[in-house]
Amino acid sequence: MYLKKFAQGRVLGTLVYPNALAGAILLLMPLSLTLAFGAKKFASGDPGNVVMLTCFSGGAGFFWTGSKLGWLIAMALAAFVCSACTGR
């Protein structure tokens, strides 16, 4: 059964498809930002650089996957967080 699948030449994996990879980035981005904000001391000395690098790497991941639905969900989450932070 598996030999027949391998003979087709298709890639088998979880994060091969763009929407799956974008979903994993969306799931891990809040955790990584929480860890970046919560860390006390960095080697570079500036925690803002680590938060900025984390945001950039998440955005770059969305750009490289080309997932339109991932961008839409990320923008909706950002709008929700911004509205919750400002109290509107």
Image: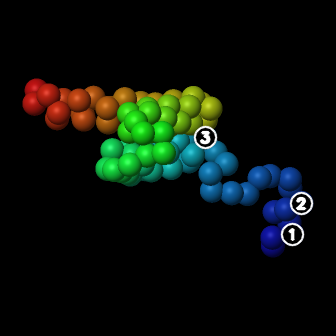
Does 10 appear above or below 1? above
Q: Amino acid at mark 3?
A: Pro
Q: Amino acid at mark 1?
A: Leu
Q: Secondary structure at mark 3?
A: helix
22 and 85: which is toward the camera? 85
Question: Residue 45: x percent and y percent?
Answer: 42, 39
Q: Secondary structure at mark 2?
A: helix
Q: Viewed as shown, does residue 38 lie left or right of 2?
A: left
63 and 39: which is toward the camera? 39
Q: Residue under label 1, please give it.
A: 3
Mark before the other along the chain sequence, 2 or 3 = 2
Outermost residue, bottom side = 1
Tell me the residue at 10%/26% (across/down): 88
Does 76 appear above or below 10? above
Q: Amino acid at mark 2?
A: Ala
Badge number at residue 18: 3
Residue 80 appearing in the image: yes
**Measured Cα–Cα span from mark 2 to mark 3:** 23 Å
Question: Residue 83: x percent and y percent?
Answer: 18, 29
Residue 51 appearing in the image: no
Q: Viewed as shown, does residue 75 lie left or right of 61?
A: left
Q: Residue under label 2, please give it.
A: 7
Outermost residue, left side = 87
Question: Residue 71: x percent and y percent?
Answer: 46, 31
**Measured Cα–Cα span from mark 1 to mark 3:** 26 Å
61 and 33: which is toward the camera? 33
**Measured Cα–Cα span from mark 2 to mark 1:** 6 Å
User: What is the crowding at mark 1: few (fewer than 14 residues within 10 Å), some, or many (at least 20)?
Assistant: few
Which marked residue is nearer to the observer: mark 2 or mark 3?
3
The answer to whether the residues at label 2 and label 1 have Cβ atoms under 8 Å apart is yes
